[in-house]
């Protein structure tokens, strides 16, 4: 796949899958929590590895495997296997990966972008950090991605939104209440094709709306993918505009879901 243009995913096959925790223990929190959009309800497994098997019930295309809000560190490794059946995961996998998880302390995503689309029914995902006695994650994403024909227009960016509150007292004191911080990605695609208008931009509005999830990978070739990957909910930024005949523009803004 082209590693220069941004990619976006708005369908998460993990949400309709049957999930199984591969390291259940007495302190294991329900694996179904990986299918809840509110990442504060995280899934937890005892030990240094969090491993999950997802049965998608049919072969479905996947381009990205992401575990947002893991408690692993930068040295954590990620293992991904995919097959037609659970029995084939070891004997005849369609895809295997074992390597860096691209986890960053500031963002806490374990990310793997597949070099090409893999269509498989059963997926096994495991993130391992030997320094952890308890492993957790807030979500599982198994998503097909669209690669845009043209990248963002200039001046796209990512910022941290600070939800802290401040007020001034009558005597001149300033009172602050610390709030959570989350990233907001804002970008405009200024050269979308007619197909991208119909099959991507308008489909994201139809299916995700303002409450669904989007995974945006701004720089797929970045050495630290977490810095350029945002998973969260879209903000309504208007529809699709035809800037000139047959060329369409769309502004995306994604607010990251965090604790």
Image (cartoon, grey):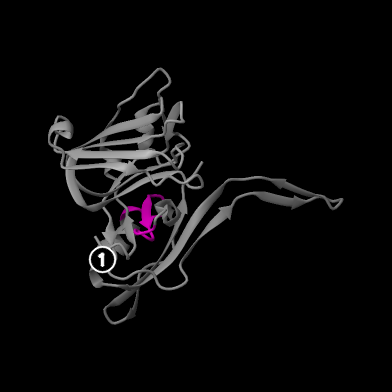
- Residue 74 makes an appearance in the image: yes
Name the side, left or right, on which 166 lies relative to 244. Answer: right
Q: Residues within 10 Å of mark 1 (few under 14, many from 20)?
A: few
Q: Tell me if 162 is positioned left or right of 199 in this view.
A: right
95 up-or-down from 219: above or below: above
| Residue 255, x across and y down, in percent | 47, 54
Where does label 1 land, which residue? Answer: 198
Magenta stretch contains residue 216: yes
| 31 vs 136, nearest the viewer | 136
The one nearer the camera, 79 or 37, is: 79
117 vs 224, left or right, is left
In this picture, which residue range is highlighted in magenta? 207-222
Q: In the displayed orientation, state which residue is furthest to the top.
A: 26
- Determine the residue positioned at 29% across, 65% down: 148
Q: Count the marks.
A: 1
SS under mark 1:
helix
State the residue lying farthest toward the bottom.
Answer: 245
Q: Main secondary structure of the magenta part?
A: loop
Q: Residue 136 colored magenta? A: no
> In x, y percent, where is residue 134?
45, 27
User: Can residue 231 be seen at all in this image of the molecule?
Assistant: no
Q: Is residue 30 above or below residue 151?
A: above
């Amino acid at each position: 796949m082209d590693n220069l243009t941004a990619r976006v995913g708005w369908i998460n096959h993990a949400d309709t899958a049957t999930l199984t925790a591969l390291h259940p223990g007495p302190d294991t929190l329900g694996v179904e929590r990986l299918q809840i959009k509110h990442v504060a309800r995280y899934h937890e497994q005892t030990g240094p590895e969090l491993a999950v098997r997802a049965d998608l019930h049919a072969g479905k295309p996947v381009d990205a495997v992401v575990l947002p809000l893991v408690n692993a560190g930068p040295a954590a490794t990620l293992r991904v296997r995919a097959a037609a059946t659970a029995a084939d995961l070891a004997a005849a996998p369609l895809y295997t990966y074992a390597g860096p998880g691209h986890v960053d302390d500031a963002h806490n995503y374990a990310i793997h972008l597949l070099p090409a689309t893999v269509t498989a029914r059963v997926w096994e995902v495991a993130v391992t950090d030997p320094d952890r006695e308890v492993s957790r994650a807030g979500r599982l994403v198994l998503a097909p991605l669209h690669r845009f024909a043209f990248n963002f227009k200039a001046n796209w960016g990512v910022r941290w939104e600070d939800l802290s509150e401040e007020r001034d007292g009558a005597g001149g004191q300033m009172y602050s209440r610390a709030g959570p911080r989350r990233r907001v990605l804002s970008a405009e695609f200024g050269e979308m094709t007619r197909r991208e208008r119909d099959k991507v931009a308008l489909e994201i509005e139809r299916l995700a709306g303002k409450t669904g999830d989007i995974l945006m990978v701004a720089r797929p070739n970045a050495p630290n993918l977490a810095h350029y990957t945002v998973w969260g909910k879209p903000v309504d930024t208007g529809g699709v505009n035809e800037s000139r005949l047959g060329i369409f523009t769309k502004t995306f803004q994604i607010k990251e879901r965090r604790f």
